[in-house]
Image (cartoon, helix red, strand yellow):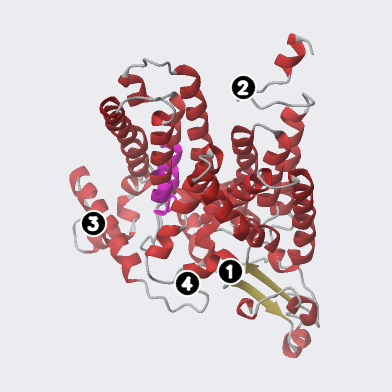
Amino acid sequence: MSTAVSAEQQTAGGASWRRPQSTWVVPLVLLGLAAAVRLWDLGDPDRLFFDEKYYGRDGLDYVTRGVEEERPAHPPLGKWVIALGIQVFGYTPFGWRIGVAVAGSLTVLLVHLCGLRLFRRTAPAALAALLVALDGLAVTTSRMAMLDATLGLFVVLAFWLVLLDRDARRHARGPDEPLSRSLLGSRYRWLAGLALGLAVATKWSGLLAIAAAGLLVLGTELAARGEGLRRGTRRAAVVAAGGGLSLVVLPAAVYVAAHAGWFAHYADSYAGSRACEAGDCAAGPGDRLETWWENQVDLVRYHQELEATHPYRSDPAGWAWLERPVLVYAESCTSAQQEAGECEVPPGTAARITLVGSPALWWPALIAYPVLLWRSAVRRDGVAATILVPLALLWVPWLAAGKPGYFFYLVPAVPFIALGLVRAVQVGPKPRLVGAALAVLAVAAFAFFAPIWLGIPLDRDSLDLRYWLPSWR
């Protein structure tokens, strides 16, 4: 093969290609598939449902007031994404959902890009992206005016940038590299910090991704250097200090900046309106900052005291095997509604939307988890470890919290579940055959479960066939 051809078959990250067209055809196809699934009939249901009742209205407040009227339960950035859709398309079901649908679609593209950095091959990267594109939890939460799909986008974006930083540092560092290079890292590390700030400014659970990014950066800087204990310890301290700047201080600054609307429209905010009622409307910058900080403390208290009484809250220990999904929408046509002409679905049918992952991804992944752990700990598989770190840190803390939560808290972990499953397939027997079988299963599962993921009306018996476990009902 000529040198010119060999160069043409290399991407910037070193991934090899059989056909140059795959550099843009495969990502575009995956993005198109993800967008088609997420945008299809996005305006149905034609009203606010589940947590849209909070976030959709908050998005409208951001458009009309610059800040939500009620006491906020989460940081503002995810609600600004919803508000942007409302600003462009109006306060309609499509308008308050389109921003999140775009975020969910872009996440699939980023999973493919992450797969290229990890696997250096198109097919496994595309398989991981396909699994996310057709996963029930990823699809349903991308079609609702909620925060989790937007959080997932920023988490995966940060992970991709950390991988770019890893590759840049591997190519740049030499055997006698000064410690200052490890302190600053590459520009991608700082961009990752920016993405992590956006994640935390969407939901506080983005802090888990900061911990994962910090461990990955530390591993990148210390791996395969062969330095002695003294210099290795010094380098670890320098990396920790630099990571504190790029992955903690910068995200914190982004988090504060995301509240610019709150500071600018203080008098219209929940806290400011109450201060005005008390005759203290003319709060200066210092007073506003103090009130903002008190609101952050109050937000911590709110989540700590939140009662676990919702029927669809569940033990995080059961999330791995889809023990308890979340029913977010249910509609049927009663005789009275039919007579009054008020049916939302055809007579004799029912429609439901359930946040449940695809068994084609989540159940095979149960076999992949111990493989990843074994490959990371025993075989020193850097790819497996790089996937396992964020997967564990986005999941295990919910177990350690010791109280029920919602299954959809794992939305940011779905890309890493898919990447981990693909890695397990790669190192197993007959990876091409198993990978092809997974792709077929993912498509078949989507075709079968689409009615309860997209809210397509069916007769009750047909719907019930899609609830495989008693706990799903």
Circles 1 and 2, Cβ within 8 Å, touching? The answer is: no
Q: From the viewer's perspective, tell me whether residue 233 is left or right of residue 12.
A: left
Residue 294: assigned label:
3
- Residue type marked 4: Asp
Disc 1 to disc 2, C-alpha distance: 44 Å
Q: Which residues are magenta?
A: 193-210
If you read the primary sequence from the N terminus, does the residue marked by circle 1 or circle 2 appear first? 2
Residue 12: assigned label:
2
* Secondary structure mostly seen in the magenta stretch: helix
Q: Nearer the viewer, mark 3 or mark 2?
A: 2
Q: Secondary structure at mark 1?
A: loop
Residue 341: assigned label:
none
Q: Secondary structure at mark 2?
A: loop
Residue 49: assigned label:
1
Q: Residue at x 70, y 15 (%)?
A: 7
Q: Residue 28 is drawn in which quadrant?
A: top right
Residue 315: assigned label:
4
Residue 465 position, x and y percent, is: 76, 77
Q: Nearer the viewer, residue 104 or 27?
A: 27
- Residue type marked 3: Glu
If you read the primary sequence from the N terminus, does the residue marked by circle 1 or circle 3 appear first? 1
Q: Residue at x 65, y 51 (%)?
A: 132
Q: Please determine whether, in this image, residue 96 is positioned above or below residue 433.
A: below
Disc 1 to disc 4, C-alpha distance: 24 Å
Q: From the image, which quarter does the C terminus lie in?
A: bottom right
